[in-house]
Amino acid sequence: MLKTLICGLIAALPLCGAERTISFAELKENQAPPGFRSTLTGEGSPGEWKIVLDDVPAAQGSSSTNTPVTSRRPVVAQVARATTDEHYPLLVYEEEMFGDFTLTTRLKTVAGEVERMAGIAFRIQDENNYCLVRINSQNNTFWYYKFVNGQRSMPVRAEVPLPSGVWHEVTIHCRGAEIQCELNGKAVFPGPLSDNSFSAGRIGFWTKSDSISHFSDIKLVYLPMEPLAKMLVRDALHKAKRVYHLRLFAIPEGQTQPQVIASGDGKEIGQIGGKDIADCIATGHLYYAKGISEAVVIMPLHDRNGDRVAAVRLTMDTFPGILEKTAFARALPVVQSMESELSKTAVRLR
């Protein structure tokens, strides 16, 4: 999927710390929250996510049973009542990906005959691959588990009071493979969990079956991510002494032509590639051209599964009598190094 490719090439290296609040305070009732995408894990149709007004505690740090001061404010609600068992509505925040972070939000189960669940999905690769913490007000359980290729893992469980109709504050700390969970300011599990399935991804809200659930603003302290595509190009140029310019092309979701997604010259981002680039991505065909002072090679970039996901255009110094096979021999280690780095990411490119 080209969408998964772009998502994967955005997954990246941490930079300096930052804070962000994803707020719903200015949104109108019945509006779908902007910046989010409604989707589904499992069977059936995606949920119905919209803004509703609810009484929310004025301060973070405890459930509403201990904080009497509340205010009427916009929150996100999943209101569809699908009763299918393997039905997991998911609302994914599309604006940014996160690797190491601390996330705090509040959630509340409101209604549901089959289920009363609400959860936070994180390090989302796609609809079938992500980590999750969820509360269940029917049996008072807090679970951590993950979906891998649509299959749910065995959960890590804790039994805690989780009454329906009450706001509960959930905090998730992610540092590499270490994951810690808090509920209403207290650790849920005896110690940190360890899971290196996914190193980075998106965040989102989650429910199950006919659960009617509400979610408040999200507060994030995180390390911003440098796009993986940019990192691959930067490192390749640093290592390859004979290559003085490099562009990485891919076909963004919804587009039909390849575009520059990373380059040694940032001004080239978004430039359209020619037929040779498109053919390289589609068929794996190699291209070579020689000028007076430079040689150009175009080679495919493969993901960890061996699938072609992009094209690399390398411009290198030339010399009298340079042969096509010599140019390819120079370019191949550069592309292989990029593929090696790409294969280390948790994101599956296909």
Image: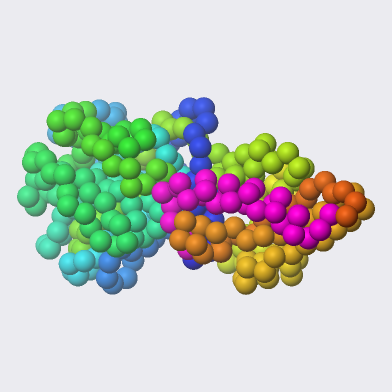
Furthest residue toward right: 292
Locate residue 30 relative to residue 134 in the image: left or right.
right
The chief SS type of the magenta part is: helix
Which region shows up in magenta?
322-350
Task: Tell me: 16 left or right of 218.
Answer: right
Res. 252 image quadrant: bottom right
Q: Position of residue 112 (x, y in %)?
A: 15, 59
Q: Nearer the viewer, residue 255 or 200?
A: 200
Residue, x 76% and y 55% (percent of image)? 326
Between 209 and 203, the one nearer to me in the picture: 203
Q: Does the magenta stretch include residue 329?
A: yes
219, 74: nearer the viewer? 219
At x 55%, y 59%, the residue is 302
Query: Is any atom of residue 95 visible in this view?
Result: no
Residue 179 shows in the view = yes
In x, y percent, where is residue 15?
52, 31
How many marks do you count on the picture?
0
Residue at image position (21%, 39%) is: 168
Residue 95 x, y percent position in the rendering:
50, 48
Quick check: is 187 in the magenta stretch? no
Q: In this view, does 321 lie above or below 114?
A: above
Q: Is residue 348 left or right of residue 302?
A: left
How is the rendered protein coloured? rainbow
| Quarter of the view holding residue 256 | bottom right
Residue 279 vs 199, above or below: the answer is: below
Left or right of 60 on screen, residue 245 = right
Residue shown at the point (27%, 70%) measured from the top left: 43
Pinpoint residue 84: horizontal percent, then vertical percent: 19, 70
